[in-house]
Image (cartoon, rainbow, N blue to C red):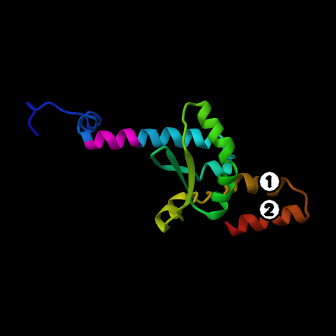
């Protein structure tokens, strides 16, 4: 790369290209609306809800299952009122079910917990009196 050419950061390049700038604005709006919607839903439901479209005054929310869709639909009146108080007014809030794909599911699965450190368990086993608890700790140590 020639050192005489000026470096243009990616963010500036995206903002100056009209189509990319429009997508970036849409992404920022959808992210802000997703956060606003999630703030007014129960935590377990909120983590599964995404704003996927905003067109003609209609807000579209996407969830991965029918059960979650039902839970969100039941809260649409209070959700709508909360969004209006934050200056987001919609003619309609629509909830759509879009099941997770295999690639989405594998990335959402938490990493497996690392095995416990053996040294503290071995020290505990030495201090415990003979009995069922000491036997259980000893079996756990042997399995590792």
Q: Which residue is mark 2?
A: 137
Question: SS of the residue at dot 1?
Answer: helix
The residue range painted magenta reads 19-26
- The earlier-in-sequence mark between 1 and 2 is 1
The answer to whether the residue labelled 1 contacts the one labelled 2, judged by CB atoms less than 8 Å apart, is: yes
Image position, residue 102 (x, y; %) = 49, 68
Residue count near mark 1 (Cα–Cα under 10 Å), binned few <14, some 14–19, many ≥20: some
**Foreground of the two, 85 or 16:** 85
Q: Is residue 5 magenta?
A: no
Q: Is residue 22 magenta?
A: yes
Question: SS of the residue at dot 2?
Answer: helix
**In this rendering, position of residue 47 left or right of residue 26:** right
Q: Which residue is mark 1?
A: 124
Image position, residue 23 (x, y; %) = 34, 44
The residue under the point 80% across, 53% down is 124
Dominant secondary-structure state across the stretch colored magenta? helix
**In this rendering, position of residue 69 left or right of residue 5:** right
Q: Quadrant of residue 111?
A: bottom right
Residue count near mark 2 (Cα–Cα under 10 Å), binned few <14, some 14–19, many ≥20: some
**In this rendering, position of residue 126 left or right of residue 74:** right
Image position, residue 98 (x, y; %) = 52, 62
């Amino acid at each position: 790369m020639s050192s005489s050419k000026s470096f243009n950061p990616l963010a500036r390049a995206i903002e100056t290209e009209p189509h990319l700038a429009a997508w970036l604005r849409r992404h920022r709006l959808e992210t802000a609306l997703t956060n606003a919607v999630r703030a007014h839903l129960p935590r377990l439901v909120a983590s599964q809800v995404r704003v996927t479209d905003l067109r003609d005054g209609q807000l579209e929310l996407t969830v991965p299952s029918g059960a979650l869709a039902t839970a969100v639909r039941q809260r649409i009146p209070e959700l709508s009122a909360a969004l209006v108080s934050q200056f987001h007014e919609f003619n309609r809030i629509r909830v759509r079910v879009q099941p997770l794909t295999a690639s989405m599911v594998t990335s959402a699965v938490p990493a497996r917990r690392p095995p416990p450190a053996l040294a503290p368990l071995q020290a505990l086993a030495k201090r415990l009196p003979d009995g069922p608890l000491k036997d259980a700790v000893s079996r756990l140590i042997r399995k590792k």
